[in-house]
Amino acid sequence: MDEKERNEKERIVELRQQLHQHNIHYYVENQPVISDQDFDYMMHELESLEKAHPEMYDPNSPTQRVGSDLMGGFQSVAHRYPMLSLANTYNQQEVADWYDSVKRGLEGEDFEVCCEMKYDGLSISLTYEDGRLVRAVTRGDGVRGDDVTANVRTIRSIPLVLTGSAYPASFEIRGEILMPWDVFNHLNAEREKAEEPLFANPRNAASGTLKSLSSALVASRQLDAYLYYIIGEELPSIGHYENLEKASQWGFKISKGMKKVHSLDEIYDFIDYWDTERKNLPVATDGIVLKVNSLRQQRALGFTAKSPRWAIAYKFKAERERTRLINVTFQVGRTGAVTPVANMEPVQLAGTTVKRATLNNEDFIRSFDLHIGDYVYVEKGGEIIPKIVGVDLDSRQADATRVEFIKCCPECGTPLVRYEGEAVHYCPNDDGCPPQIKGRIEHFISRRAMNIDSLGPETIDEYYRRGIIKNIADLYDIDVQQINGDGSREKSARKIVEGIAASREVPFERVVFALGIRLVGETSAKTLARHFKDIDRLQAATLDELTHIDGIGEIMAKSVISYFQNDENATIVRRLKDYGLRMSLSEEQLAGHTDRLKGLTIVISGVFQRHSRDEYKTLIEQHGGKNTGSISAKTSYLLAGDNMGPAKLQKAEKLGVKIINEQQFLEMIGLNA
Ligand code: IVH
């Protein structure tokens, strides 16, 4: 081995070690010590060195987070130690009973209890050997689970290689994989726009994500993980709490609020405190877990067939009320999806009046065998939208009629269809069903699409009724005369026509989004626009081409193809092109795009020297970042100019949001001249 080769190999080892450490600073401790730019730089250096030395391949290298996809599904593997669940309690008396049973079991010996959050995600068991992640297995039936190692590797807060050297040679650590609230809300907002079925809660979203066969998709969903139970033959300490503290030094994210207590009163205090404080946590929790701290005492207490005697879960009460179902109505969305809605007698729930709840689809209605006039239980738990969780069968009237899903569209009378494998009913009359037509036009003019704010839903409704517009392309044919009606509205008519004309400047990716292709949300529209660069290429894309794009699944790909295959749509697109809408990426767009700000949320505040605020906004987006208006815990950076309000600054400091000036920002995107 010559000297160059030796140096390069040493450098690979060094970079890997440093990058593992920086990952922990960033994703586990939320305290990066180097800039993202330096991090990327080191990562690139490592990538190119690894390319030059394939013999140094290591599945646990920081470059290998997103690996190859699983072709044949997951392998089922046996757990070395079964994954048991916990007994649940729902009130203080049951907690006291458990506490007494522990006291009896330990024959009066003193004991400590470790109180921690009960995370509401999906449990995972990680095996580490010689400080390296070797396997990640889901709970499954507790005896066998699925090997999801490739997907779990993409979760940045799970260390691939541990830091320090004080960890046991071999151990398992268990915890919960979660989708943070902000990621969940964003994902659902995207799905809503694309009229895809929403995830009911972050747990379902996390579970759906982890079971995906594409590790790139898993990586893009930004899952997080908290670890709460370590098992092995040679653990560093004789206490559970102490072992977890050690684990945190090896690079794991553990429950932040964890506390060791000595009495029942302290347990109650902990429960009371977190019952409200948990609402400020970035991830979903559904209770508190109490564990006898001493491992010796845990062994003495042992297990029942299902759960340990040394631990118990106290579940927070989901807020639930009982109310009466008045009737069920059906709404037709922009893509023709028909959603049943329960209209109920108003009831107060978790601070708001609830009178409507979505019933999702026919299967959901059937699962409750819902009847009109039923008393139903509505709950607002982890979910944002209230949902029906049960029916009080005892109070059902003998002559109550069963809720039936409608057969025909309530708007246009067309028989509904239900595609194979989908739970949703659709009205297939795309071109003739009024809410679909109006919905598509409303979507087209909306702020994030063509942003024609001189028009609104009422005007669209009026023009549609008057026969002025039947599709999005007709908008560009409107003239002042035509909409001026009796002649008294010239000024507003002019404004409307000007607003429509100005939308010709809207960038291509937003035009793609505005078309309203089923399942294509804002992000996917951007992906498609950037990939194909102009409408002709997008229109000509094959299924194979589409499904090879990161982030575009088969169902969406099929929807894109069927959109352009429809003659009516093809005519609309051709007309829009003729009216001068942007149908390709601009020169600057082609030149200046990077992913440098991917995953970052940046707030702009103050006055700048080198670019205007709007220019900074565009730059953030061009480099893959997100610009938002107000500072929150989710903000990655505050881009601060002169004369910034003190309140914003204070908030940023309080939340630990990094503050950067324009120089630093321009450096981040490689534009510092
Ligand atoms: S300890 C042998 N600690 O709750 C006991 N579990 O209902 C091992 N969970 O399967 C579990 N937060 O998925 C433990 N701080 C916590 C937890 C926790 C959430 C989940 C876990 C478990 C389920 C039991």
Image: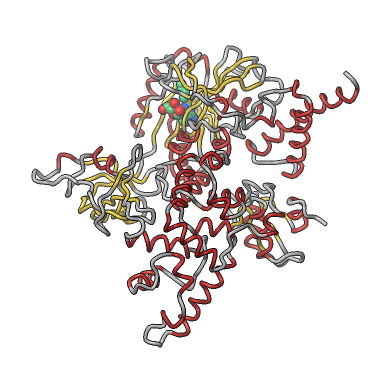
Colour setting: secondary structure
Query: Is residue 41 found left or right of 411 in the rendered image?
Result: right
Say which quadrant the C terminus sits in: bottom right
Which residue is situated farthest in the right direction here?
3
Residue 563, above or below 215: below
Residue 132, above or below 455: above
Residue 378, above or below 429: above
Residue 391 in percent (x, y) is at 22, 41
So how many labels did they put on this image?
Answer: 0
What residue is at 72 percent from the left and 44 percent from the top?
36
Quarter location, residue 1 = top right
Residue 117 visible in the displayed image: yes
Query: Is residue 308 found left or right of 242 in the rendered image?
Result: left
Residue 343 visible in the displayed image: no
What residue is at 56 percent from the left and 32 percent from the top?
215
From the viewer's side, name the closer residue of 63 and 166.
63
What residue is at 32 percent from the left and 59 percent from the top?
433
Quarter location, residue 490 = bottom left
What residue is at 22 percent from the left and 49 percent from the top?
407
Which residue is situated farthest in the left direction here?
399
Residue 364 in percent (x, y) is at 28, 41
Residue 605, above or below 667: below
From the viewer's side, name the closer residue of 5 and 122.
5
Residue 376 in percent (x, y) is at 23, 45
Residue 195 in percent (x, y) is at 41, 50
From the viewer's side, name the closer residue of 237 and 573.
573
